[in-house]
Image: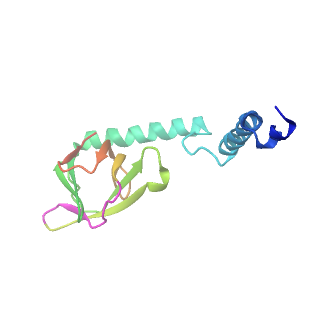
Amino acid sequence: MQESDVKPWYKQFYPWMLICIPLSSFIVGGFVIKFATDGTNTLVVDDYYKEGKSINARLDKLAKAEELGIRTTLTTNESGFVVEFLSGAPKTGEALKLDFYHVTQPEKDFSTLLTADASGVYRSSKEFINSGKWRIRLTPMDEQWKLQRMVVLPQSSKITLEP
C-alpha cells in the first residue's frame, strides 16, 4: 500500500463514529437538564396542610349535596351543555357553574355558566371542543354544595352526577 492511498483521518468513518458517541450523550444530557429545570410542575402541591384542609371543605360540600338529595344528568352536544335535575333542584332557579378540569393539562381547564329556562332545565351555549379525560364539577354560585365526576368526553349518552 502506498502512502498516497491512505486517506487522512478526517475522511474516514471510524474516527467520526467514535467522536459522535460521546458528543451525542452531551447533547442529550443538555436537553434532559433543560427539561428538568424548565418551570415548575403544576401537578405537585407545595403546601400539604392547606390542601388537606381544602379537601375537608370539599367533602362538606359533597355531604351537603347528598343531604339535599341532588341528582342531575349532564348532556354535551355541539350546541353546548344541558343539565337536568332528577331530584333536589334549586327552588330559586339560580345560575349554576360547570367547571371542566383536564386531568393532565391545566391550560385546557374552563368554566361555563348554566342558566335555567322556563322548564327548569339548565343550559349553556359554550361549545366543547377538546376530547379526553375530564373532572367535571357542578356548583351553585354560592358554592353551598357540589357534584363532581370523572368522565371521558365527548360522550353521546347522558352523564349522571350525584354525590
Q: Nearer the viewer, residue 159 or 64?
A: 159
Count of marks, rendered view:
0
Rendered residue at 23%/49% (across/down): 155
Is 152 left or right of 10, judged from the image as shown?
left
Is 150 left or right of 21, judged from the image as shown?
left
Q: Nearer the viewer, residue 70 or 68?
A: 70
Colour pattern: rainbow
Q: Which residues are magenta?
A: 119-130
Decide: is 38 above or below 118. above
x%, y% of residue 35?
65, 44
x%, y% of residue 38?
67, 48
Is 159 left or right of 141, judged from the image as shown?
left
Rendered residue at 45%/36% (across/down): 56
Q: Is residue 125 magenta?
A: yes
Q: Nearer the viewer, residue 90 or 136?
A: 136
Magenta residues, dominant SS class = loop
Residue at the extreme front: 2
x%, y% of residue 98?
33, 56
Answer with the quarter of the image where residue 93 lies. bottom left
Answer with the quarter of the image where residue 25 lies. top right
Query: In the rendered image, which quarter contains the C terminus?
Result: top left
Q: Is residue 46 magenta?
A: no
Query: In the rendered image, which quarter contains the N terminus?
Result: top right
